[in-house]
Amino acid sequence: MSSGFFVHNLGCKVNRVESDTMAASLIAAGATQTSLDEAAVVLINTCTVTAEADTKARKAVRQALRAAGQPWVIVTGCAAMIDPQAYAELDKRVLVLPDKPAATDRALALCSPPQAGLPASKPLRTGDAFPTRMGIKIQDGCDNRCSYCIVNRARGTARSVALTDLLAQAQAAESGGVREIVLTGVNLGSYSSAGVDLVELLQTLLQQTAKTRYRLSSLEPPDLSDALIATIACSEGRLCAHLHLPLQSGCDSTLRAMGRLYDTAFFSERVQALRKALPQVALTTDVIVGFPGETTADFEQSYAFCQRIGFSRLHVFRYSKRTGTPAACMPLQVSPELKAARSRLLRELSAQLQERDLQTRVGTQELVIVEKRTQGTSESYLKVEVPGSCEPGSLVRMQFTGYRATLIHGSIIAPID
């Protein structure tokens, strides 16, 4: 009889951290992580950012219900918060628990109980079951009101994790051998706890840990302050010179319709300040095509702006109408055919920009975190081919000598203690 658990993660990096935390808590309490077909209970951490995300969540539930072990299926996360009834009606074995600690507790109860009398171990998210690059969630929720987004309803208002808690997590991770921590949040730049802002948090983490490097998962453009830029520039590589700044559109009228809190002039000025302090910085972004009312001229402006900024890579999304958001009711919805054509053009631009970025990296040196045998991730967030002798989890300095497709390669200069 199956007795273990399986976690299916959908959506953003915040979800990934939460899924890993649920898994670690279950393992620490004595439960066994298994394959989908061997599980007694399947935890599905859902995303609801688009209509397509909801479709993927329902598909994941149906797939879990067909698993060989006929598991209980616990649906948690954003989609469970927005429309719990829709998931509860799928099957009597589906339990909808939007609160993740409650979902974890229920999953433990449904697994075969751990051996009596054994104390739970500390739930560290390290080891073969978890990513080498460990995520820590520093805040949740969002106070912004972008017209296409429902996340503020799903996750609530912005709130931050206490500095003491974050420091304890980072120090425990470092003691466990973690060499890169990815700081995640729904709106990372809004971090504020007992008068400590994001810059002060970063400075404290750098001072109170010795070997671990840190990466910011995503940052809203208005939060890229001069103080933050200076902190990254002065960190000697311990704060990765890579930022993901979601642009969403390079057209001011579209940005206004989206409810974004900046225009292209502001975005451009911030990028210039960043590159002046950190010439080697890698800059990635999100762009939405086909937002309601986006004309051909608007798209061409957005395309030209992305080209001019010279991002390292673009994450291109076709606008997806999300029920419950203001944008879903806007007139002049763009046809699927136009969205597809515009998406294709921006993806082609992204490939060109990535090729140019790879060319600039050849001949340079970077620290690389080894994630698995023969592959790692550079400070600039490139996938790197590493020698098979490098241990997963280790940090090495490499000289880049070339690339194939999007995989850069080079030689080891030195391991980092």
Image: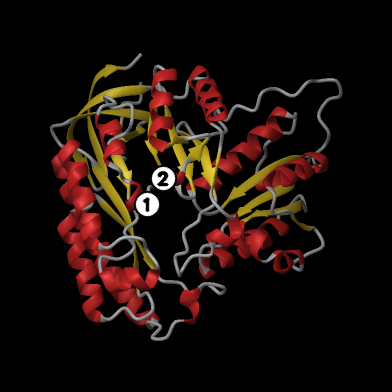
Q: Residue furthest right?
A: 116
Q: Position of residue 97 (x, y in %)?
A: 73, 53
At 23% from the left and 40% from the top, the residue drawn is 281
Which quarter of the image is occupied by the N terminus?
Answer: top right
Q: Check the image and report above or below for 292 versus 217.
A: below
How many numbered callouts? 2
Q: Nearer the viewer, residue 224 or 382?
A: 224
At 54% from the left and 34% from the top, the residue drawn is 130
User: Where is mark 1, residue-wise?
Assistant: 220
Query: Is 352 on the left-hand or right-hand side of 207?
Result: left
Quadrant housing residue 215: top left
For the question of whether residue 268 can be seen, the reply is yes
Q: Check the image and report above or below for 108 versus 312.
A: above
User: Where is mark 2, residue-wise?
Assistant: 189
Q: Residue furthest front?
A: 195
Q: Position of residue 319 (x, y in %)?
A: 41, 71
Q: Name the secondary structure under disc 1.
A: loop
Identity, as a three-letter code, of the amino acid under mark 1? Glu
Q: Check the image and report above or below for 290 versus 358.
A: below
Identity, as a three-letter code, of the amino acid under mark 2? Gly
For the question of whether residue 382 can be seen, the reply is no
How crowded pointer 1 is (Cα within 10 Å; few <14, some 14-19, many 20+) is rated as some
Marks 2 & 1, CB-CB < 8 Å contact: yes
Query: Is 352 on the left-hand or right-hand side of 243?
Result: left
Q: Position of residue 198 (x, y in %)?
A: 42, 37
Q: Name the secondary structure under disc 2.
A: helix
Q: Nearer the viewer, residue 71 or 244?
A: 244
Query: Is 289 on the left-hand or right-hand side of 172?
Result: left
How crowded pointer 2 is (Cα within 10 Å; few <14, some 14-19, many 20+) is rated as many
